Amino acid sequence: MRGFRAYYDHGIIIEYGGKRIIVDPLRKPSYSFDAVLVTHGHRDHVSPGAIRGVLPLIMSNETAAIIKARDSMYPKHLAASPGSRLLVNNVFIESFNAGHVIGSLSYVLDFGDLRVGITGDFNVEPSLLLDGARGLDVDVLIMEATYGDPDYVFPSRPEVYNELRAVVEDGTRNGIVLLMGQPLGRGQELTVLLRDYPLYVEPGIKVINNALGIRHGGVLSGFPPAGSVLITGNQGNMVQVIRALRARYGELKAVALSGMYARSSRALRLRYLGIDALPLSSHSDFPGLVDFVLSSGAKFVYTVYGNAVRFAKYLRGELGIMARPLPGSGQLTMDAFLW
Ligand SMILES: [Zn+2]
């Protein structure tokens, strides 16, 4: 493991055995690399400007289709899919289902004498559209920790689906239902879950759905008939939108969907505005993250994103696992975790 380095510098950088691999760069790489990997299509993981002309570039065909549809730029890439093993500049790159959004992958870099896993965002719980992610068999694990705080425990997905269906059933009988969540992820899941209702999907979600072959529902524009379900992204001007819909239809049921609403203070804040909140997430909750670490067999864990500091502390203190937040490039000289 001598000479292994992992750090964050506008993307995750992994160096070992004279190789450098970059994962999810948000800025065009300013130094040499052997491969650039993209885990999934969320904008905080891929930026068209950062990957334009980059070779070799690896991602799933679904992620490439999302980028093409949404950002009008087709990334020329080597296609990876769950179970694939590509040899790129003498590094084997294995791909696994991340269970996060359609096309999302976790990667394992097999350097021969060292296996390094990079989860990207992932979800261990299966959904209507995706299988759950399984622990990666690796020596070093670089994992997301968005909900790496014990406050974040989600109800099971079937429970959330049932609760949501009940809200929609009630809301469409008396007026209109507005559902708000991440366009990539919640957008597709809600569209498929509620396909039997009169659905209207905002253009930013519709374009992704179409690229992925999900055709249910019309395009949301203007005011659809009462009894409809509207699926939109997170509204910046939520209060005005809700006021306008209430004025038009009388009865409105508005629901925001995100894992962050597992924290009751967050959900309460929305209730004051007349918005319900349900913890439907594309990420693992806290127990899911712990379970993933325990099933990976990793000797060293780096945490990144969200509650990275909190989660690494938990792994060290409670489970005795060597874990630390992924350092920034400037912190490397102080990094006692190197070997
Ligand atoms: Zn994501």
Image (cartoon, rainbow, N blue to C red):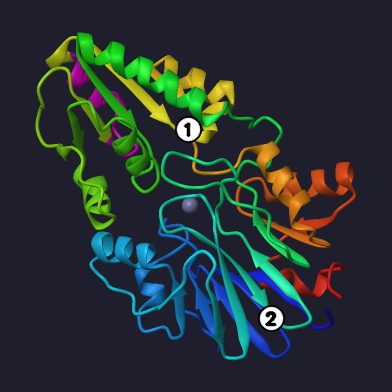
Mark closest to the chain's N terminus, 2 or 1? 2
- The three-letter code of the residue at mark 2 reads Glu
The residue located at (9%, 22%) in the rendering is: 225
Question: Is 171 placed above or below 53 here?
Answer: above
240 and 188: which is toward the camera: 188
Q: Position of residue 281 (x, y in %)?
A: 50, 38
Viewer-proximal residue among 196 and 4: 196
* Residue 146 against residue 21 in the figure, above or below: above
Q: Which residue is mark 1?
A: 280
Work out whether 241 lies above or below 27.
above
Distance between the alpha carbons at the discs numbered 2 and 1: 36 Å
Question: Is the residue marked 1 within 8 Å of ligand 1, measured from its CB?
Answer: no
Q: How far across and how far down the image is residue 114, in percent? A: 77, 77
Q: Is residue 235 visible?
A: no
Which mark's residue is nearer the viewer, 2 or 1?
A: 1
Q: Could you tell me if the residues under marks 2 and 1 are in contact, i.e. CB atoms within 8 Å?
A: no
Residue at position x 43%, y 64% from top? Answer: 46
- Residue 221 is inside the magenta segment: no
Q: Name the side, left or right, on which 80 lies relative to 231.
A: right
Three-letter amino acid code at the position of disc 1 = Leu
Q: Is residue 2 visible?
A: yes
Packing grade of label 1 (10 A; few <14, some 14-19, many >=20) is many
Image quadrant assignment for residue 287: top right
Span highlighted in magenta in the image: 232-246
Instruction: Indicate the secondary structure of the residue bearing disc 1.
Output: loop
- SS for callout 2: strand
Q: Which quadrant of the figure contains the C terminus?
A: bottom right
Residue 144 at x, y percent in the picture: 62, 53
Residue 229, horizontal then vertical, whole percent: 23, 26
Query: Residue 79's image quarter?
Result: bottom left
Is 236 displayed left or right of 200 in the figure? right
Q: Which residue is mark 2?
A: 15
